[in-house]
Amino acid sequence: MRIIITLPSLLIFLVSCSPARVSPVSTVAAANTVSPTETKTPYPTLTANPTATATLSMSATPSATPDPAIQILNSPDSKYVAKLYSPINMLDKPVIKIFDEQNKLLRQIPYQGEVPEGDPKPSLTIYEWSTDSSQLYFYYVWSPDGGDWAFWWTGYDLQKIDMKTGKLQRVLPGQGSMSFAISPDGTQIAYTRAQDEPSIIYVRNLVSGAVKKAKVLSDSKNYVRVGDIYWSASGQNIAFQTETDDYMVQTIYLNPVTMKQKVIKEYELFTLFFQGWSDDGKLEFLDYEHGNRIIHINPGNDETVVIGTPTSRP
């Protein structure tokens, strides 16, 4: 492995030890649970409560009251905005509301199932818009509550709403904890499921429904988590992570066409932090053990580039 030191640039990143993009999950069943099979049985569909006639009150002067939404996401074409509202009363249910450009309420996505009286509670969460703004993806996630934080998992019960019809449809089959990521062009989704033993990585075509899958590399190891999935900007490469019961982490490269895999890095948990793909198509790591320096690794030839010099440890 060839090491290249790039000087004199110095990049220092302060990153939390817990990745922010994922949260621990549980196997709480939501409404319309899907059988954990890979058959092409049509998913049951629901209809979101369309409220096209409901409008929000508009005042002539700007209101000083901030929007109480806890999550806001504009559609790529800027025609819609999705907002997640969490009630003040913890026993009430959160709701996702979708507005048009004139702030007119078009759709509502209700919380499915009962709200537990105790904590943690499964949270309704906006995932992302489709690239053509015709669909909004959403899912459920358990908020962290101490203990062993399974931060490789994303959530569970990924669904989407069709903006024209208001119908809700489940996107992924299976039950319980999952990790998933949609390709940059919106045509594919890569995912793993905690229920699979041995562990499997899937790539599903969201247009045709065709599925590719492969047993996770080196699955003879006792993996307790498989996920934290990242697509490269080109959509031609995937990286994901595994963790064993002795806290060893493997960052694995996956070719979504051939489904071939390659271990890029193996390290003890919290000594490195995988940050996804860099702009130049390399895998980027934050090296905690050497002064929080940034490392880029070429998955094709394993060439490693160290960005800057390490800072002294306190």
Image (cartoon, rainbow, N blue to C red):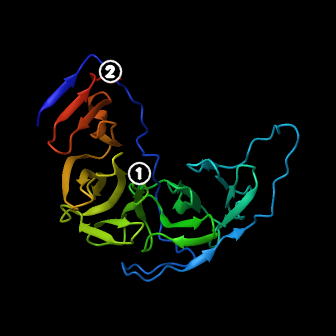
Inspect the image, locate mark 1, and give the three-letter code of the amino acid beneath it: Pro
In this rendering, the answer to whether 213 lies above or below 16 is: below
Mark 1 or mark 2: whose residue is earlier in sequence: 2
* Residues packed near mark 2 inside 10 Å, few (<14), some (14 to 19) or many (20 plus): some
Image quadrant in which you'd find residue 89 = bottom right
Q: Name the outermost residue toward the top.
A: 8
The structure residue drawn at horizontal position 39% and vertical position 71%, both measured from the top left corner, is 208
Q: Name the outermost residue toward the left.
A: 1
Inspect the image, locate mark 2, and give the three-letter code of the amino acid beneath it: Leu
Could you tell me residue 312's position as x and y percent?
Answer: 31, 21
Could you tell me residue 276's position as x and y percent?
Answer: 34, 44
Which residue carries the number 1 mark? 184
Give the label on residue 10, or none: 2
* Residues packed near mark 1 inside 10 Å, few (<14), some (14 to 19) or many (20 plus): some
In depth, the one of 65 and 204 nearer the eye is: 204
Could you tell me residue 266's position as x and y percent?
Answer: 21, 48
